[in-house]
Image (cartoon, rainbow, N blue to C red):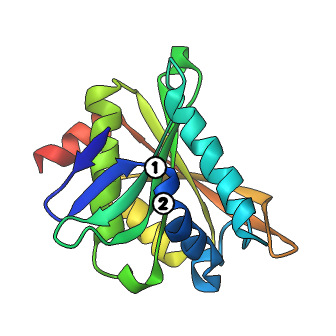
């Protein structure tokens, strides 16, 4: 499965992505707000990648994890995912991680908008949520720029680098997304 924008291609992961994913997860600046932490070995990353690939095979699907690449060069840029909640609630959570070499170019916003479009149009979801460390200004901007609304703050919920960090809670409804598309 793949999704495409003008500049980006979102494709499901394969073992061929192992080195790219490991490098991405090993960058301290990219890991600054990540609860996983930097992997100790490539085998740690491989186990995570295998878990994501197993999720791709489930029926019904509960998770979609994509590699993000530039259309023009097929260069790996990062990851983005949609994890579905209980079917009755028609809800999901998104997360993303972009290589620092590609920051500040609107790529994350573009990928997230495409993933939200998939969530609402194809999967017929009602609500998509995201969490974000309160100090992660860049991610806050991305979430707000795609129309997500900050609904609250969870205290000391993220274990990051040996400390408990607060998290903002964001969400967008299908009706919010439709209104934003019409603008």
Other-residue count near label 1 (Cα within 10 Å), few / some / many at <14 / 14–19 / ≥20: many
Residue situated furthest top in the rendering: 88
For marks 2 and 1, give the CA distance.
6 Å
Q: Position of residue 135 (x, y in %)?
A: 62, 76
Residue 2 showing in the rendered view: yes
Residue situated furthest front in the rendering: 16
Nearer to the camera, 148 or 117: 117
Q: Which mark is residue 120?
A: none
Residue 74 against residue 111 in the figure, above or below: below
Q: Which residue is mark 1?
A: 13
Nearer to the camera, 143 or 60: 60
Q: Position of residue 70 (x, y in %)?
A: 25, 68
Residue situated furthest right in the rendering: 162
Nearer to the camera, 2 or 149: 2
Numbered circles on residues, count: 2
Q: Residue at x 50, y 34 (%)?
A: 56
Residue 53 against residue 71 in the figure, above or below: above
38 left or right of 23? right
143 left or right of 115? right
- Secondary element at image label 1: loop
> Toward which corner of the image does residue 3 lie, by quadrant?
top left
Other-residue count near label 2 (Cα within 10 Å), few / some / many at <14 / 14–19 / ≥20: some
Q: Position of residue 155 (x, y in %)?
A: 78, 59
For the residues labelled 2 and 1, say whether their Cβ atoms are less than 8 Å apart.
yes
Residue 119 against residue 4 in the figure, above or below: above
Q: Which mark is residue 17?
A: 2
The quadrant of the picture occupied by the N terminus is top left
Q: Residue at x 50, y 69 (%)?
A: 20
Q: Position of residue 29 (x, y in %)?
A: 59, 84
Residue 35 showing in the rendered view: no
Q: Residue at x 27, y 61 (%)?
A: 110
173 left or right of 72? right
């Amino acid at each position: 499965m793949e999704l495409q924008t003008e500049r980006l291609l979102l494709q499901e992961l394969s073992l061929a992505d192992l080195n790219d994913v490991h490098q991405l997860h090993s960058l301290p600046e990219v890991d600054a707000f990540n609860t996983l932490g930097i992997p100790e070995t490539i085998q740690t990353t491989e186990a995570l990648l295998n878990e994501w690939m197993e999720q791709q095979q489930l029926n019904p699907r509960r998770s979609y994890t994509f590699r993000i690449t530039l259309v023009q060069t097929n260069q790996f840029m990062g990851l983005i995912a949609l994890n579905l909640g209980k079917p009755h609630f028609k809800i999901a959570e998104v997360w993303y991680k972009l290589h620092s070499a590609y920051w500040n170019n609107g790529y994350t916003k573009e990928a997230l908008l495409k993933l939200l479009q998939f969530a609402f149009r194809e999967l017929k979801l009602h609500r998509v949520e995201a969490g974000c460390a309160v100090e992660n200004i860049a991610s806050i901007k991305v979430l707000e720029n795609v129309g997500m609304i900050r609904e609250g703050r969870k205290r000391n919920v993220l274990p990051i680098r040996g400390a408990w960090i607060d998290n903002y809670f964001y969400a967008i409804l299908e009706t919010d997304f439709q209104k934003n598309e019409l603008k």
